[in-house]
Image: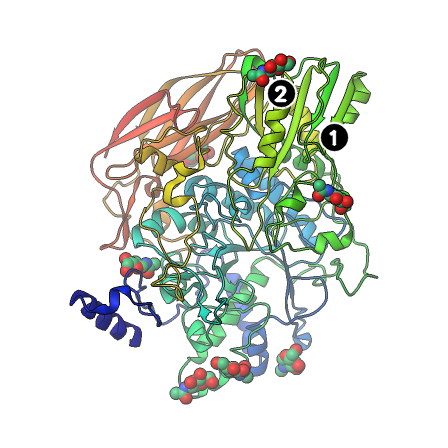
Amino acid sequence: MLAFWRKTLLLGLAAGNVVLAEDVITDDAVFYGESPAVYPSPQGTGTGDWADAYTKAKAFVAQLSDDEKVNLTAGITADNGCSGNIQGITRLGFPGMCVSDAGNGLRGSDFVNAWSSGVHVGASWNRDLAKQRGIHMGQEYRKKGVNMILGPVVGPLGRVALGGRNWEGFAADPYLSGILVADSVKGLQSQNVATSLKHFIANEQETNRNPATNSEGHYVESVSSNIDDKTLHELYLWPFQDAVLAGTTCIMCSYNRLNNSYACQNSRALNGLLKTELGFQGYVITDWFAQHTGISSANAGLDVVMPSSSYWNGNLTTAISNGTMEASRLDDMITRLMATWYYLDQDSAFPNPGIGMPSSVNTAHEAIVATSKAAKSVLLESAIEGHVLVKNKNNALPLKSPKLVSVFGYDAYTPMSYTLESSFSFPTTDRSALYQNGTLFGGGGSGANSPAYIDSPIEALQRRAYQDGSSILWDFTSEKPFVNYVSDVCLVFINAFATEAVDREALSDTHSDTIVTNVANNCANTVVVVHNAGIRTVESWVDHTNVTAVIFGHLPGQDTGRALVDILYGDANPSGRLPYTVAKQQSDYGSLLQPSEPDEKYQYFPQSDFTEGVYIDYRAFDKDNIEPQYAFGFGLSYTSFAYSNLKISKTSASSTNYPPTAPIVPGGNPRLFDTLVKVSATVKNTGKVDGKEVAQLYVGIPNGPVRQLRGFDKVLIKSGKSASVSFNLTRRDLSTWDTSAQEWLLQRGTYQIFVGRNSRDLSLSGTLTI
Ligand SMILES: *[C@@H]1O[C@H](CO)[C@@H](O)[C@H](O)[C@H]1NC(C)=O
Ligand SMILES: *[C@@H]1O[C@H](CO)[C@@H](O)[C@H](O)[C@H]1NC(C)=O
Ligand SMILES: *[C@@H]1O[C@H](CO)[C@@H](O)[C@H](O)[C@H]1NC(C)=O
Ligand SMILES: *[C@@H]1O[C@H](CO)[C@@H](O)[C@H](O)[C@H]1NC(C)=O
Ligand SMILES: *[C@@H]1O[C@H](CO)[C@@H](O)[C@H](O)[C@H]1NC(C)=O
Ligand SMILES: *[C@@H]1O[C@H](CO)[C@@H](O)[C@H](O)[C@H]1NC(C)=O
Ligand SMILES: *[C@@H]1O[C@H](CO)[C@@H](O)[C@H](O)[C@H]1NC(C)=O
């Protein structure tokens, strides 16, 4: 209320042209974003398939004392190797919970695998692999006694090209992210391990992600992502909705503010969007140290604080007795927490919390092997399919029995040391200099993962040379290496590092570009491999006549070398497609290149206005008619594909303007997911080798972007054969968010349907009238 008054007052003054416009704002008055208040916090009801879990959780909570209840609302610190801990209640046989980093593999552990990162899974466009990866990663968490994985990530979505954490998530597109996160959640939770989908919501930059004291000693709040309701629904909330529908048991609220209210105390986001509109039955956990108020965060819908709470504790019961909080809110907080434990059957035969986690103080921990033989093929396939071949002049690849392979660049070899200590490490500054010293298989920060081994490119290439009797020369350190004139191929390995806590400085770097150019100047067959934790621009060398092939290798995890060699030598046909747009130059990203920096006026309350609406990544390039270097969805294969026979048909499902009313289940109104239209096409493999194609469907929704991804189908097609690809368009896929009705609206009119190879190569098109 106070904020509202201030706002009105200042707006009034501004309108009267009084001095304020030039002034530095020193309180939390704002002009753009303000979230409506949504109270009270909805209680979990046990809807969907949660009834049984809620019955058990309620019976458990009924036996707790007030102090025990309060104890469950926040983590406790324990040097047991887990990122966070919920303490047990022994008298009731509840052993507590261990929760740990992160969404792309267990961090700070031994005997676990380093899986491909989110962006790599995004680049694979492979639903089944996403699920299989989830299953096997989930098994590792389970064996280590980790009750909940702190992931997967769908926020950041990738609004800011230089975002430091974009690689942790899948794609700069809500549809692709949503599909892949849903399959990941299903895979992980099939192993009884909880997922805490993060970061809710609009955590699109690392710069000013947390409040801090600036150089003049003034307190500066976190950046506020100011987003209109329509954009929030159609872009940023979308993949969260898919994950709630898929059954995610926990949601992690983020560091940033949303419309000037901290994400962990924004009642519109937590009580409104998540717990009312999406019918979420699990609990909301804070990102580490992301709680900034006491009772107001509880009333706004926050359930559990990590790593511990300095605000709640006994204050919760005081607040109940003095009437500022309902007792039912406290019960709901821990009922939601305990319901997830029962929902995933963690009450029966789940390993003791943290049993296999090494800790920095407990070096004499038990050796619990979580890797498995069964995981190996999934690790390798997942590593292979996230590689995207973007240039292949005169079929330079696959290699044809080269006699001499020359290898250059700092990214080809195994890092000089890898110890248990390294696996704990959590780089919070841009250590790209360090990473230009060994192959990059994952990014930095809490999303870094711990490998059982690292099969670097050079090791895999050496094995190949041993097998086929060829020779290798290498120079990993020179910026201008000597090139043996008789090399059949020169492989240049560079990378683009990114980490949590800082945004990237640039989309390319001079040292790496110089190595490529220097090699290409002296080698007629130069193949560049970039291990990139996000978008990497290539304009300084991609058109060099001697650069014959380019692969974006992303972050493949520990099997990076063998996966790459399978592709280079044609044992595997590349089938990855870009889950983002690569611009010709970084300035083409315009206002979406860099994170927002505090300006003079709002220097203590940094503001990031998402005024571009849904027009990020390819939606922005399409709108502004900018030719990308490589379009969203682009990727080459060793074979070729031809598309034909587009068919569009409506189903008998209701096509009323708004979805028919139905009881809300986790994910929202279930009728949003009715299939309204089916689309199919024929894809023929017209080349000489078998290969996988990712058929992509884009829809031009009236009054929206010219095209938005709304379907994809990855199919293996044998040389000369055809396959049918099919897509289901749901009501939500075809709708827009109607802010006044607060419903998804299915507009009447003509919809454009496009099917093809990528967002800029869509050979089939048709229309649909609704
Ligand atoms: C944020 O603020 C804008 C402008 O004031 C408003 O339109 C929008 O609905 C708010 N978004 C949320 C999520 O509350
Ligand atoms: C609450 O947690 C604290 C810290 O672990 C512990 O000392 C205390 O005994 C707990 N209270 C109850 C009632 O279990
Ligand atoms: C109650 O909250 C205040 C801050 O609002 C905090 O300083 C205090 O430590 C809290 N008390 C307990 C018992 O947690
Ligand atoms: C009630 O207790 C809470 C927690 O200690 C405190 O923050 C709040 O100011 C109190 N309100 C009143 C009206 O006493
Ligand atoms: C690479 O790492 C090794 C071992 O940590 C170190 O000795 C060397 O100086 C580093 N090289 C560069 C170029 O940073
Ligand atoms: C390409 O490589 C050859 C060496 O094989 C070199 O003679 C030529 O100058 C290079 N071309 C360019 C444009 O650098
Ligand atoms: C489309 O929906 C049908 C059920 O209506 C399902 O059998 C089929 O697998 C779905 N296809 C795709 C591509 O999701």
Q: Quadrant of residue 263?
A: bottom left
> Is 763 above or below relative to 10?
above
> Is 324 above or below relative to 47?
below
Quadrant where the C terminus is found in the figure:
top left
The answer to whether the residues at label 1 and label 2 have Cβ atoms under 8 Å apart is no
With 63 as the anchor, is 36 left or right in this view?
left
Q: Position of residue 231 (x, y in %)?
A: 33, 49
Q: Considering the numbered disc 2 on the image, is that residue within a helix, a strand or a loop?
A: strand
Q: Position of residue 304 (x, y in %)?
A: 53, 69
Look at 75% across and 14% down and name the residue there.
Answer: 403
- Ranked by sequence position, the earlier of labels 1 and 2 is 1
Q: Of the residues tagged 1 and 2, which is closer to the observer? A: 2
Count the marks: 2
Look at 75% across and 55% down and name the residue there.
Answer: 421
> Is 593 above or below relative to 273?
above
Say which residue label 1 marks: 458
Q: CA distance from mark 1 to mark 2?
A: 16 Å
> Is 409 above or below relative to 165?
above
Say which residue label 2 marks: 526
Toward the left, the furthest residue is 16
